[in-house]
Amino acid sequence: MEKIKKDGSYYLNPYLGGVILGVFLFLAFYISGRGLGASGAVKNSVAATVNVIAPDHAAKSAYYCQFAGGDKQPMSNWLVFEVLGVLAGAFFSGIIFNRLNFKVEHSPKITSRRRLVFALLGGAVFGFGSQLARGCTSGAALSGMAVLSFGGYITMIAIFGTAFVAAWIFRKNWI
Amino acid sequence: MIGSIISSGIVSPAWDNLFAVIIGMGFGFALESSGFSSSRKIIGTFFGYDFVVVKVFFTAAIVSSLGLLYFSYLGLVDFSTLYIQPTFLTSAIVGGIIMGIGFAMGGFCPGTSLCATAVGRIDGLVFLGGMFIGVFLFSESFPLFENMYYTGSEGAKMVNTVFGISPELFTFFLVLAAIGMFVGAGWVQKKVQKIEY
């Protein structure tokens, strides 16, 4: 426990947080034989939605038909259940560490509106990239690293390496 | 019990989704309690004022890698039953670069945006909404990227084989590199001007 902030919330020591995360990542592999993920649940939700609204279109798509259609059940998927757990676990943490409140977090130098526009664009760009790379920071990079996947390491280096450069380009939004 | 437990057949696969919820709860708790529901805390890594991402991410990578290797050494984990992220070099690099840009624009990654949403951060919820749009756009334009998506498949390639060393030795170097980064992060953080957020 450290860094009690002005608003009364506080954080776990980052190394302790890392150990807890590492233990649950280990358990994911030990129990279920797979890593943690986040973007995969979004992919399944999109595939399921398209499959309900336009089943013919989903069946013809070389991408959707991998996840939805036929007897595939995209919403009854390990990652979808795991993401429901993520929301619950983060909510409990928000209660314990006094961080539950509605707000748009942004640098005082920019407006909420600008922050939200960039959050939307950033989410869209990240979501697009996560499909190309077959996973995001959790599913491809972190879970890949846990089992020493070469692709996982490459994705991790590409994400963080690019983000250092791109953060400088978008620095006026942050500092 | 030899892991993965689900593949060993000791526990019915029907339990797998329940384990998914419990494991997800630990994942979400670890991320949020470390401060990953705050985009300004996350993005601090890229400006040097808060390295929580580096500390949490690499600690977790070390703990899980060491745990799996140790259990494998004891004969308690069979690596052939684990899902190993397959290597497609081109799409991993290009996808990673695109994600890095999205990261710097949005201040979250998918997992952390879920945590931010869960504690009421509107920017997290909007990022999450953006992800649905991005995934939809990729899926619809898949024929354009199909070649890139499937090119250069190297299967479940292990990173240690690239260097021609054992998994154990690679993990040893990973631990050394992580400790080096933690020390370096502490040093940089002292030099950089504090930012109140």
Image (spheres, grey):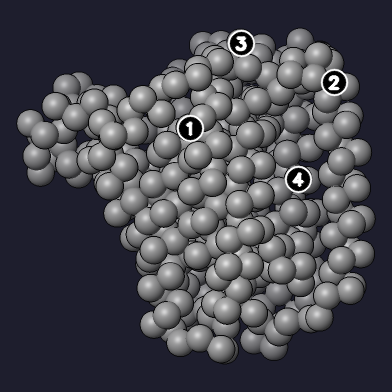
Tell me if mark 3 has few (under 14), some (14-19) or many (20+) residues whose alpha carbon lies within 10 angstroms of its own.
Answer: few
Residue under the point 92% across and 64% down = B187
- In this rendering, the count of numbered labels is 4
**CA–CA distance between discs 2 and 1?**
28 Å
Quarter holding residue B30 = bottom right
Comes first in the chain, label 2 or label 1: 1
**CA–CA distance between discs 4 and 3?**
24 Å
Evaluate whether label 3 is on the same chain as label 1. yes
Helix, strand or loop at label 2? It is helix
- Is B82 located above or below residue B136 in the figure? above
Tell me if mark 1 has few (under 14), some (14-19) or many (20+) residues whose alpha carbon lies within 10 angstroms of its own.
Answer: many
Residue B80's disc number: 3
**CA–CA distance between discs 3 and 2?**
17 Å
Q: Quadrant of the N terminus of chain B?
A: top right
B116, B177: nearer the viewer: B177
Q: Are marks 4 and 3 in contact (CB under 8 Å)?
A: no
A105, B104: nearer the viewer: B104
Q: Amino acid at mark 4?
A: Phe
Q: Give the number of the mark in front: 3 or 1.
A: 1
Which residue is tagged 4? B58
Comes first in the chain, label 4 or label 1: 4
Q: Mark 4, chain letter?
A: B
Q: Quadrant of the C terminus of chain B?
A: bottom right
Q: Amino acid at mark 1?
A: Ser
Evaluate whether label 4 is on the same chain as label 1. yes
Which residue is tagged 2? B168
**CA–CA distance between discs 4 and 2?**
17 Å
Comes first in the chain, label 4 or label 3: 4
**CA–CA distance between discs 4 and 1?**
23 Å
Evaluate whether label 3 is on the same chain as label 2. yes
Residue under the point 76% across and 10% down = B75
Comes first in the chain, label 3 or label 1: 3
